[in-house]
Image (tube, rainbow, N blue to C red):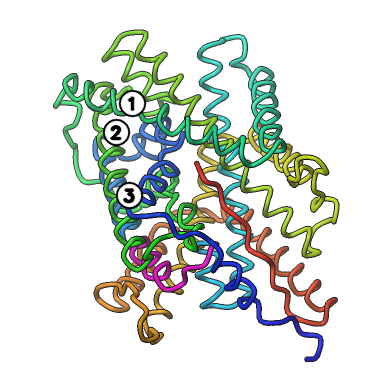
Amino acid sequence: MTDAAPPRHEPISTSEGKLLRALGTWGLAASIVNITVGGGIFRAPGSPEVSGLLGAAAPLAYVACAVLMGLIVLCIAQAGSRVSLTGGPYAYVEVTLGPYVGFLVGVLLWVVGSTAIPGVATLFADATGRFIPALAGWGGRAIVLAVIFTVVSAINVLGVRQGTRLNSLFTVLKLVPLLLLLVVGAFAVNPANLAWHGIPPASAVSRASVVLIFIFAGVETALVPSGEVRNPARTVPRAVLLATACVTVLYIGLHLVSQGVLGTALAGDTAPLASAAARVFGPWGATMISAGLMVSAFGYLSGMMLAAPRALFAFARDGLLPRALASVHPRYRTPWVAIVVQGAIAWLLAVTNRFESLVIIANVSAALIYLGCAAAAWKLQETPVPDGVEAFRVPGGILVPALTFLALIFLLSSVTLRESSVLIAVLSTATILYVVVGRARGRGLNVERFDAPPDA
C-alpha cells in the first residue's frame, strides 16, 4: 500500500551503528548478576510454595530453575549473537516472528515490570515494619509504599543520570551481606535439617519453580543493550552462562544455609535470611540482612521505575494509550506523566496483593517471553548466516529450543486459571488495540521498542 510505513529496521540499523560497542564478557556478566540478584532471594527460601511444599528437598526447585534458565540463556545467546539490536528479547522476537508478536512481547515486558515492582516493594515495606513496628500494619505499609514510590518516581523524573548513579552504588551494597551470610552461615548449618524425607512429586517442584523463577530472571533485561556489546557472538553466550552459574551457586548456597540453620521453622518465614542471620550473628545479623534487603529493594525499584514507564510512554506515543502519557517534562526531558502513573499503579497493586501472587503473574509473563525467545532461536537455527558474520549456534540444533518449550510448558502447568486470567485479559486488550489502531491508520502498527532497566 502507498501509505505503508517504511521498513522499520532500516532507521534502527542506522542508529544502532552509532552506538559504542564497549561491553565485554565480564562487564555483561556483572550486569546480569546485578539485575538478577534483587529483593526476591531475601523472601523466596521461606515461601509456602517453596519450603512449605518441598521441605528440605527445596533445592530441587532451584536446580530445575537453573536448568530451565540454562536452556533459556542458550536460546537467548543464539538470538543475541545474530540480532545485535538494542531491545533484547523484544528485538529478537520482532525480527524473527514479526511486529505483532514483538508488540505482545513488549506488553509482557511491561507486565513483568508492573507486577515485579510492587512485589519487591512489599518486601521493602515488610522490612521497614520490622525496624518500625508502628508501620507494620496495613495503614503503615500503605504509607511506606506511598513514600517509596514517591521517592523513586521523583528520582527518575529528575533524569536518567540520577537513577543510574544510585543503581551502581546499590549493586555493591546489596551483595555484601548475602556473601557474608553465605560464608559464615555455612559453619552454623545443622546437617540434620538438610535431610530429605522422600522425593516430592513433580507437581510440587513445578509449583515451587513458578515462584523461584522470579529470582533467576534478569538475563532478558541485561541483554537489552545488545547493540553495545563487543563481539556479541562470543560475548553474549559466555556472559549469560557465566552469570547464570554464579547466581545459581549463590541462591542454592543461601537456601541451604537458611534450611540448615532454621530447619522446619523456615517454611512460612517472611524474612528467612534475616532469621538465619539472627541465629548465626545475633540480633545485629538480622538488622544487617534487613538493611541489605531494603538497599537491594530500593535499587531494584529505582532501576525498574527507570524503565517500565517508558513502555507507557511508547504506547501513548503510538496512539495505543492517551496522549497525555507521552508528555515530556520541559526541564528534565523525562516522561514524567508516565512515571507518575506507573508509580500510582505500582502502589495500588502493592497495597492490595501479597508478594507471591504478584510474583506468579510476573513469572508467567516472563515464561511467555522466554517461549518467544525459544521460537526465535528455533527459527534462527535454520537461517543462513551471512559470510563474514560470526554467530553462536546452540549445541544440538533444534533440540535445545524444543527442550526449552517443554520445560516452560511444565513450569506453566501448575499455574491456575485465576492466575492466568489477568494475562489473558491484558493480551486480549492489547490485541484489540493493535488491530483497531492499525486499521485506523490503514496499516500494521509497529510499536517502537523501549529500554529495559539497567538494574533490578
- Report if residue 41 lies within the magenta region: no
The residue at 74%/60% (across/down) is: 315
Direction from residue 384 to residue 9 in the image, left or right: right
Magenta residues, as a range? 71-86
Direction from residue 32 to residue 432 in the image, left or right: right
Q: Which of 251 and 176 is in front in this view?
A: 176
The quadrant where residue 234 appears:
bottom left
SS at circle 1? helix
The residue beneath circle 3 is 26
The residue at 35%/39% (across/down) is: 53
Residue 99's x, y, as percent?
63, 75
Q: What residue type is labelled 1?
A: Leu
- Residue count near mark 1 (Cα–Cα under 10 Å), binned few <14, some 14–19, many ≥20: many
Whichever of callouts 3 and 2 sits on the residue coming sooner in the sequence is 3
Whichever of callouts 1 and 3 sits on the residue coming sooner in the sequence is 3
Q: Check if mark 1's residue and mark 3's residue have beta carbons within 8 Å.
A: no
Q: Calculate the distance from the C-alpha at mark 1 to the C-alpha at mark 3.
A: 35 Å
Say the numbered circle drawn on residue 163: none
The residue beneath circle 2 is 255
The residue beneath circle 1 is 266
- Residue count near mark 3 (Cα–Cα under 10 Å), binned few <14, some 14–19, many ≥20: some
Q: Which amino acid does label 2 sit on?
A: His
Residue 157's x, y, as percent?
72, 38
Q: Check if mark 3's residue and mark 2's residue have beta carbons within 8 Å.
A: no
Q: Which of 268 and 321 is in front in this view?
A: 321
- Looking at the image, residue 92 lies above or below residue 358: below
Residue 21's x, y, as percent?
45, 60
